[in-house]
Amino acid sequence: MRRLLMIVVVLCLIGADRVVYAPTAYTDRDGLNLRPAPPTRPGPTIEAYVRPEFAARMRRLRNTILVAAARHNHPQLSGMSDREFAIVMATILYNENFGWAEELAPPLRMVTPLYQEAQQQVNSGIGANFSVWPANLRPSVAAEILAGEVPLADGSILHIPLRVEGSQIDLRQYHDQRALFAAITTEISHDELAINYLAANLERGVWRAAIEGQPISWRTLAAWHNQGIVDPVAIQANPTARDYVRRAAAYLPAARMLFATTDHAEMSAL
């Protein structure tokens, strides 16, 4: 009971989406609720902070990211090498694990790991749909990934052959959404599996952009992961996506450095 009360208190204090107050919620062109927009801040400079323990996790996951990138990248569509795709993945992971709220209020850095665990516990306990780290994926999005569904801008669904390496979930066996979300939470809270889900999600973004004739870059995939949009005009018009891409840019050097020692021999062995 004490642990449950602690979880509830943390969620009430910090909020359901890494915020400490109720910011304006933005919607996409279909009227769907998206992540709340961060407060407007002057200037492009942010602190590209990486927690020491997360930096160590990223070094440990380096090869996992490279393998997942090679599995889900389609160079003929993305225009990226597998290593470049891996850099995009790392950029997103760094960005997802240090949000704007923590930058504005540094004391939140101490409780963020507790908050992340709290959301995971709530999902696991009652089948909720809170985001789960390290990739900051909601179970509902992960379910789309497992189903190979790519929602398009016109509201239709593109179905692609997609497999998340290591996943043991068979969607056909679940008739209760809460049980499904609890099972998915277990998978996406596991570092290696979360990496595979992230890579598969970015593959969906590549297909969405290719089908809709949009240019594909790290910005495209970052906005896709954050808001489910790929159109550059839509990205610029969406305050949350625009700020997310701005923040992600600060982590590109760290992501590139993570793979700086990768040579051709190592890549060919993957």
Image: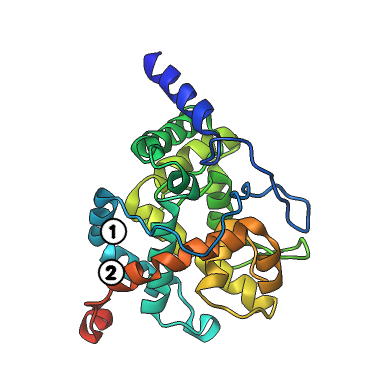
Residue that badge 1 annotates: 58
Residue plotted at (78% across, 51% down): 31
Q: Among all residues in the image, which is located at the extreme front?
A: 42
Left or right of 94 in this view: 8: right
**Which one is earlier in the sequence, the residue at label 1 or at label 2?**
1
Q: Are marks 1 and 2 in contact (CB under 8 Å)?
A: yes
Quarter in which the N terminus is drawn: top left
**214 shown above or below 153:** below
Residue 239 in view in this figure = yes
The percent coordinates of residue 79 (x first, y second) are: 50, 85
Q: Quadrant of residue 83?
A: bottom left
Residue 148 in view in this figure = no
Residue that badge 2 annotates: 258
C-alpha separation, residue under disc 1 versus residue under disc 2: 8 Å
The percent coordinates of residue 148 (x first, y second) are: 58, 61
Query: Which amino acid lies under the numbered mark 1 shown in the image of this protein?
Result: Met
The percent coordinates of residue 94 (x first, y second) are: 38, 58
Crowding near the residue tagged with mark 2, few <14, some 14–19, many ≥20 C-alpha atoms within 10 Å: some
Query: Which amino acid lies under the numbered mark 2 shown in the image of this protein?
Result: Leu
Residue plotted at (71% across, 50% down): 26
Total numbered labels placed on residues in the image? 2
